[in-house]
Image: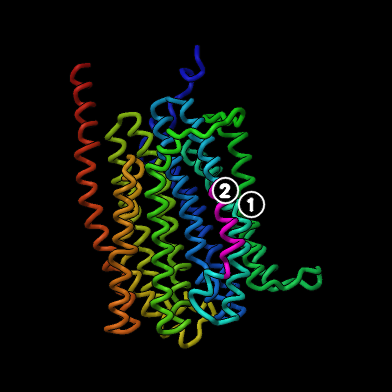
Amino acid sequence: MEMTTERKENKMGSRPIKPLLLSMALPMILSMAVQALYNVVDSIFVSQLNEAALTAVSLAFPVQNLMIAVAVGTGVGINSLLSRKLGEKDFEAANCTAVNGIFLGMVSYLVFALLGIFFSRTFFEVQLQDEQILNYGVDYLWVVMVFSMGLFMQIIWERLLQATGKMVCHMFAQVVGAVTNIILDPILIFGVPSLGIPRLEVLGAAVATVAGQILGMILAIIFNLTLNRELHLSFRRFRPSKKIIKNIYSVGLPSIVMQAIGSVMTFGMNKILLMFSTTAAAVFGAYFKLQSFIVMPVLGLNNAALPIVAYNYGARRPGRMKETIRTSIVWAVILMLLGVLAFQLFPELMLSWFQASEEMLAVGVPALRIISLNFLIAGISIVLSGSFQALGNGVFSLVMSLCRQLIVILPLAYLFAKWFGLTAVWFAFPIAEIVSLLLGLLFFRKLYQEKILPLEEEVRNKGESA
């Protein structure tokens, strides 16, 4: 008997949806929450140096976000294709997908390492001329780009664990990497003279970040090679497959562009806010770190739902797909509601973590309260976007993201800045989110009619003929 016929049904096709989603989502939510924590802690420690250091790290965020976009977007394409192939019981194609995905991760790393070597200073010079912020920023950005192999490989190898439902291993790799970063941050930023560890300031934050990513990468590789029985990875006689790479990027490229748009939005928003002050840009950076506490767990939930939807699409089980999407939306809204309450009730406390001055509080308190109004809407949009990716329609996710993060928000923010002042700029966020959700609902209706209804008809006909 061939090996492929002996494999048991993956839990994504057999377990009840709510317990399955919960078992897969909890490790993801925990790992993403820890990920958000170390992002915030990074900025909290940096802000203890001075506001210029916080501003420098905030201005570097678009490039970091772009690297994450490429890694995660490629991972989404791998995840979607790999889960579908497992659902179809095509294990050879699943293995080829995984190996080609690892190859793409390495190529992406090399591109960004070269960009970091040659263009880190240029990136800051086109934004401002403050020498202290510029030097801090270049120190930070150069390290996180040149040594970004940990970032790319950790995310790619973790996606292989995620696609096969091994969320606890995925969580452990992320948590260990994040905790390592948190521990190293104060040691490397402020130094420990008694141990001979110098004070590296912002450079220390960058070194702590890449060290955590490299450790997470090592653990993810070990887990895949020792525990992931559904994949048999081999690079002997490896040749890149144009067909597989095309299929990965048919879903992954829209996801990359969708997340990369966030970098363009952040860069553009920083330019608008710098019209008012560097403090406004620092507030925006602090907001992005804080909102990750809320958004990251929802992304974790969505990342757990994506392979379930993709697997059951490949396995021709529309009922399980619909239940997964429906349950994910309800849970996402509940998580986002907690975020709205936190931002509305405790904005001063949150900003105090970043050593906020009176000026920063004056700008930041209304900013946090206004922007957080979009959280509930964003929860629904995130799940819809993930569903589009799982079903191989990443372009719908891309269009939603374009409207939310580029087409609507930047022109509105600029006009509000010119006409009404700084406080009005923050209203561009909830307005853009409403437009994105309306588009998402239209897209989901179209996708439901084209892909899910035919599956339901197919299942119904099989039942009648049985």
Task: Please tell me which residue lies in front, 222 or 340.
Answer: 222
Residue at horizontal 41 percent and vertical 56 percent from the top: 259
Is label 1 in contact with label 2 (beta carbons under 8 Å)?
Answer: yes
- Which sits in the foreground, 23 or 83? 83
Q: Is the magenta stretch mostly helix, strand or loop?
A: helix
- The quarter holding residue 436 reads bottom left
Percent x, y of residue 248: 43, 40
Tally of numbered tags = 2
Q: In this view, does 299 lie to the left or right of 217?
A: left
Q: Residue 257: x, y in percent?
A: 39, 54
Numbered badge on residue 154: 2
Callout 2 crowding tier (Cα within 10 Å): few <14, some 14–19, many ≥20: many
Q: Does the magenta stretch include residue 308?
A: no
- Secondary structure of the residue carrying numbered label 2: helix
Left or right of 88? Residue 47 is: right
Q: In this view, does 206 lie to the left or right of 263?
A: right
| Coloration of the structure image | rainbow
Q: In this view, does 80 lie above or below 282?
A: above
- The x and y percentages for residue 241 are 48, 33
Callout 1: SS: helix
Measure the C-alpha gap from mark 1 to mark 2.
7 Å
Residue 183 seen in render: no
Q: Residue 214: which disc? A: 1
Say which mark, if any, is on residue 117.
none
Name the residue furthest bottom: 358
Q: Residue at x 40, y 47 (%)?
A: 253
Vertical relation: 241 (above or below) 215:
above
Q: Identify the amino acid type marked 1.
A: Ile
Magenta segment: 107-121
Residue extending farthest to the top is: 1
